[in-house]
Image (spheres, rainbow, N blue to C red):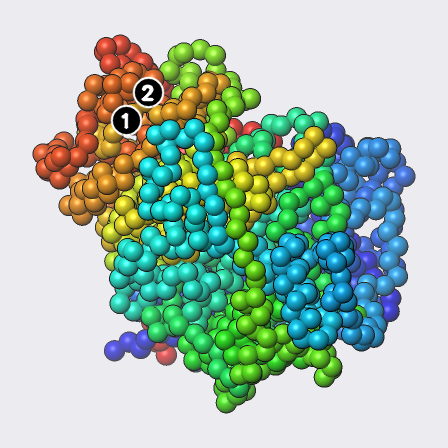
Amino acid sequence: MPVHAITLTHREGPESPESRAAASVIRGAGLMLDALEVRTCYLIEGDLTKGHIDQACAILADPVLETVSVTQGKIPAGADSGTQVIVRRKDGVMDPAEASVIKALRNAKIDVHAVKRAHVYRTTSRLDKDAIRGLSRALVNDVVEELVAGELAVTTLSIDAPYRFKRIEVPIRNLDEAGLKELNSHHSLSMNMAELKATQAYFKRAGREPTDVELEMIAQTWSEHCKHKTLTGPVHYEEKDAGADSLFELAPAVTPQGGKIKGLLQSTIKRATDELDRPFCWSVFVDNAGVIEFDHEHGVCIKVETHNHPSAIEPYGGSGTGIGGVIRDILGTGLGAKPIMNTDVFCVGPLDMPRENVPKGALHPARTLRGVVAGVRDYGNRMGIPTCNGAVYFDERYTGNPLVYAGCIGLLPRGSVVKEAQPGDQIVVIGGRTGRDGIGGATFSSVELTEESEVVSSGAVQIGNAIQEKSVLDVLLKARDENLYNDLTDCGAGGLSSAVGEMGHRSGAKVELAGVPLKYQGLSYREIWLSEAQERMVFAVPPKKLDRFLDLCASQDVETAVIGSVSGDHNMTVTYNGEVVLSLPMEFLHDGLPRVERKAQWTPTKPRASGSARVRSNDPGEILRAILASPNVCSKEWIIRQYDHEVQGMSAVKPLSGVFRDGPSDAAASVPKPKGDKAVVIGCGVNPHYSDIDPYWMAHSAIDEAIRNVVCTGGNIDHTAILDNFSWGNCDKPDRLGAMVRACAACYVAAKALGTPFISGKDSLNNEFATDQGTIAIPHTLLITAMSVTNRNWLTTMDLKQPGNLLYVVGSTRRELGGSHYNLVTGKTSMDVPRAWPQVALSTYRAINRAQDAGLVRTAHDCSEGGLAAALAEMCFAGALGAEVALTQALAASPDARDNTALLFSESNSRIILEIRPEHETRLKDIFAGLPLVSLGKVSSSSCLVVKGLGGEALLNEDIESLRETWKQPLFRAMGETPPAIR
Amino acid sequence: MSETPKVLIFFSAGFNTEAETKDCFERAGAEVDVVHINAIVKAPEQLKQYDILVVPGGFSYGDDIGSGVVFANQLRTLLRKQIETFLDNGGLMLGVCNGFQVIMKAGLLTSPDGHFEERPSATLTWNQSARYEDRWVRLKVTGGRTPWLPDDGGIECPVRHAEGRFVPRDAATLKRLRDNGQLVLHYADERWQPATRFPENPNGSEEAVAGICSASGQVLGLMPHAECHTYYWHHPHWTRDNTQTLRDTNGLKLFQAGVNGAKQRLAKL
């Protein structure tokens, strides 16, 4: 069928916002172009009349701003005097715009066969081949897009191909170890020798050879991604030179038998939850997400996922499908929860990294960050879920292997927490169609990245279609409320294989693949079974409710297909047009994985000095400004405002607070039932630099920080649950695993002492990047997310409120500068990483809750990166008020902290700065009797933060507007922009 | 005795503020149904039961081509007669954010007769910043023309959009709308005067236009999310103070004005 190219030209030409934005990206990549203009072109295939084409133009072009040109079979080259390049997504790569255009045209009774979108970049500059290559690097990700210079001829958009069924067997029974290894790499199974042998033994017993999908389903079900072998398997921990920080001293309960640990997760994280046995925990570690009580009618659930490896290769698609995936986790929690908040945390390389220092095969950190932010923005915003909490952390070791954490919080009725598929239930897949997207994602995420990953793994990358998932969300919640199904699971890594395998794991399932709706023809049974195409959910629907379920989906344009049934024979059976292509007992799939004991070792090492030290002087003001401008601390407004953080009308504490709405909130609070008086508070903690000294104290600090953030904002310490997300290096290497053991042990100790159970978690291992010069492992990174259910009237923000009010700090300050931002900006190193005293912390947090309940707390702010000095600065500029503070001996909890530097910049845990009205001083002191509470000074109406040292000398006298600018500008500047003026 | 006005909120793939919008109309005293476009198209005569039609915010059909265009065309091709009759009979209509984009692109705001228009004379397009932003703004109200708004005063609430820049076809169009009193909401600076600069004018709208009404005043469209400042704790400053200012700039008054307008019409029928 003919292809018509409809090209839209904007009346503002190079001055249109799209053109200017593209020019800015290209400039950022070091290319200067004159009069760059971006045009959008829709390639439309179909037998269309002139009338149809005119009508299509009227629909696609803005009547005020755009003019249209139509050509046949090609996008013509531009004028001779300049350069034109055309960028489009590769065949088969999702572009949600195409479905929108088809919808719009078919509504208008224009029968189109297929649509593809392209962007045409024209400049008056004449570019040679090298310059075009540079332009391509700036604009195009080769994994999903292609660039054509000049004219683009298009004769068809169809990518359908015929498929002839052939059942493929893979001989395994007679292979020796070398043969098994060869098989492992040929099929990208990522299995170890014990697993290969267990698989071989199974098929010897079965007396037959496996099919290709049987092998791949076993590999996938047993993958690190799905089974978490490292955290659930046995470990032998040893340490050397640990001194006072010996794990046998710090956490004797975790290491009772000389370092032999049966299962790390079971003996640390889950154990804390079991032993705490908090009644507010409704469902923990058994479902997609943990569920805790919200009120007597509803629970709140939370899940945080990583999507690191896909985001390394294609940041936009990787982070978008990361958020899309975790939203489906929440949709699939219990019988379905309504997503009410999203979170995101990114760890990337330094934005100012010189291009020549970027390892081959990796993207520049600025490009990675721009991509992952856009991915979360475009997916989360379209889903109508506010993205309201997060963090960004920078370290050069993240460059080749950035981290993308995406979280989602949901609300579900008490009666919907438990689900169970019943034999006879029909298995129905709904939502997106299946294509060749992301095949092998589960096994891909379980291996380390190399500079080749970009080439070999492009199949593992997907781009999402949020509106498809939004429609699934809409019908899912209606179907839940009509009680139309017994079970549901999301299609994530592993696709149908994983989803149906999970749904049928107690009773067995039979699936026929020929009826699965496809995006295009030509997929083999293997591709259909393993595809990780997005936006699909699988339901177990009782036969008598099937018609209503299918009608409900159809009424909101959600496609469905009945693909099988829950069987009761405890076997996974898959057919293609009736021919059996997979038949495996559920028991072997889920419990046949052999367990290997792994070695874990720990020897303390001195951290390396930061390469990014900026300050040589000892002037506290200069050090404070350097900390405020440092990438981890500086304002993330450039990111935050790109996210809708208040859709659904529940937002009570937003990510930015204060007079000019630009101060850094400690946590976000939402009121999921606006007519009620309860709130959910979400905060996080992440301290990868502490890992370089000791992952034990890193983990303890991350937990304390997440909880502190939540408590500052009004969270109730006695109704708080936490989540762990480990991103680690290759744990087959004993030092990486040794670090993991220490972090897990701290998780047990801290959670137990603070009374905050872990309710869910996820680990991502093998975060290493192989280069010619060796392997770069990321810093051991543990993200802790805390969720608290609290009273709305306890909520507070971090901006100073009223001159004359008093400032107090709760908690003890020690000389703890190891891994601190003071060390980072001054280039110093030291081993004195922040420690924790969780029993005191618990009493302190409870006292803060009592003060919040009594209405005494006007402002509370967490002391973390940059210590007391940075926290005070943030409170001042957020409130547009000054402060007069005097450091006193009373602040120091240890003799070595009786020092201005330590008092200003130590990152000691469990400290919070409070602002109270003068008349409440006595009541506050009563509440904190016996706890560390020290007066700092008062809020002033001046525009200065004034801090006097221990000897009464002037340490800081900083103009708060200048501090604000110092803190506010760096990220905007790094992304090539100017921050907006305030007011 | 006045009857309770009935509100219909259109729903379809990608809309996402229907729940909080429903809450606002209910608190303002109306009965509210959220109905999928497919169900309306099946039985379009049901529109007659309603006094107010609302197109909520979100990303209808993904907004991947011009925002709101696909849904606007659905209304135009599938429900044109019913909606025009509804308006001819004095019904009220509201579009917020994506809903504003929809009714703007359907021509319902700029056409001289209040009906659909094939080529509307104004549009909403990409923010000058070329990206999506969530940011609180001040809205200066110049009502009078429309039952949806008081005669003056202000509202504070967030904008959350990528394509909210108001651009008229030409100076004559702008003059016509201005002279007609249709430019009823303006982004305002700290002195509550129309804002020319970013970020007070968050998208670069001409004449700082944040919302306009139809020639008759029955139809109102606005980019900012008035429904997102209807509880005192929505306001970013609620932890700072609870003074009258915060209450004065609450967005619920818009929904109350609309419902009152519908009540007055019902009383006259």
- Residue situated in front as seen by the camera: A679 or B154: A679
Residue A606 shown left or right of residue A558 in the figure? left
At 62% from the left and 59% from the top, the residue drawn is A195
For marks 2 and 1 on the same chain, the one whose residue lies earlier in the sequence: 1
Q: Which residue is mark 2?
A: A902
Q: Residues within 10 Å of mark 2 (few under 14, many from 20)?
A: many
Mark 1, chain letter?
A
Residue A13 visible in the snapshot? no
The correct choice, above or below, for A828 with respect to A217 in the image is above
The correct choice, above or below, for A703 with respect to A202 in the image is above
Residue A165 visible in the snapshot? yes
Q: Position of residue A500 (x, y in %)?
A: 58, 72
Mark 2, chain letter?
A
Residue A349 position by quadrant = top right
At 41% from the left and 30% from the top, the residue drawn is A242
Query: What's under tag 2, amino acid-wise?
Result: Ala
Local SS, label 1: loop
- Residue situated in front as seen by the camera: A934 or A961: A934
Q: Which residue is mark 1?
A: A813
At 51% from the left and 57% from the top, the residue drawn is A326
Q: Residue furthest right?
A: A80
Residue B192 shown left or right of residue A813 in the figure? right
Q: Residue furthest bottom?
A: A544
Mark 2 vs mark 1, CA separation in Å: 8 Å
Residue A866 position by quadrant = top left
Q: Position of residue A5 (x, y in %)?
A: 81, 58
Q: Position of residue A408 (x, y in %)?
A: 46, 56
The correct choice, above or below, for A220 with respect to B248 in the image is below
Say if labels 2 and 1 share a chain.
yes
